[in-house]
Image (cartoon, rainbow, N blue to C red):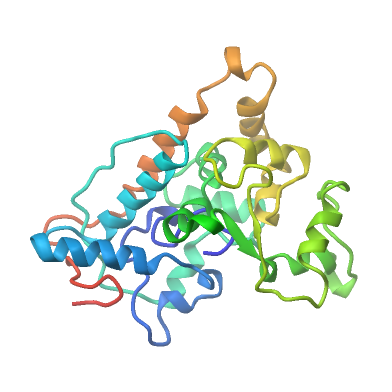
Amino acid sequence: MEGQVLPPWLAMGRLQPPLVANGGGVSPHAFGHQGVGGFEVIERAKARLEDECGGVVSCADIVAMAARDAIALSNGPAYDVPTGRRDGEVSNVSLADDMPDVRDSIQQLKTKFFLKGLSDKDLVLLSVIMGFVQKNISAAHSIGTTACFFMMKRLYNFFPGGGGGSDPTINPRFLPELKSICPENGDVNVRLSIDHGSERTFDKQILQNIKDGFAVLESDSKLNDDIVTKSVIDSYVGFLNPIFGPSFEADFVESIVKMGQIGVKTGLQGQIRRVCAAFN
């Protein structure tokens, strides 16, 4: 989902099913999945694997391993990915409702994660890669970007009832920059970095940005409004973190591995797709 820190296949652990099919009524056509890229990379990897060992490696495992490698190649932590997943046999636009959305309230975000067995801490940690992995898989020149389309309400019509105005949580020093990239009535397809100042490196800079009012996405900024998620952010970017604080890298790995094990199909469940974009 554009503006969520992960490909939809990864978000909320939904490694099955990947987005499939090109017809209407399936998950690629959900609002929050517009602009998702990287499909061709996954399909190329799948084609090579099918040539070598057909019917063995699922699309779900390919996506999980591609995410792992994208993180490692961008200065992030290396970690082991449990494999053996099988691909799902359902793709429906309604499934996207389970995914985090840039328009969600903080309580909606927390609830969506809770219902998948993920904590508020996981929500903060996994926000670091919402958008990052998708674009790192698909194209190096647009790592961790979103489109102005997802920014217009926050920049120009934030208040209910058509009252206009900008989100007051945006740092006043940052607001002119955002508006210059995404002018009112401008091209909504223009892209901007989600992780301001650290576009091509996997790190915890986005948490500092959230704390300082430099969050690009409204859903990210809301993490600083909730007392619990704010305390998690502070634990990683506070001045005592280097000495007494938790390890961001170790905790992140724990969260992403946990997420990748939600609702996994194994054994005789699901299928091993021959082509990731379609059911067998």
- Point out residue 21 in the picture as x, y percentages from the top left corner: 34, 80
- Point out residue 253 in the picture as x, y percentages from the top left corner: 41, 35
- Point out residue 149 in the picture as x, y percentages from the top left corner: 68, 71
Which residue lies at the image location 86% right of the left edge and 73% below the top edge?
Answer: 161
Q: Left or right of 87: which side holds 114?
A: right
Which residue lies at the image location 61% right of the left edge and 62% below the top edge?
Answer: 146
Residue 270 visible: no
Q: Left or right of 19: which side holds 32?
A: right
Identify the residue at the far top of this view.
243
Q: Left or right of 71: which side holds 104?
A: right
Q: Left or right of 94: which side holds 90?
A: left
Which residue lies at the image location 70% right of the left edge and 56% below the top edge?
Answer: 218
The quarter of the picture where residue 80 lies is top left
Residue 178 visible: yes
Task: Pick the residue in front: 225 or 76.
Answer: 76
Quarter placement of the C terminus:
bottom left
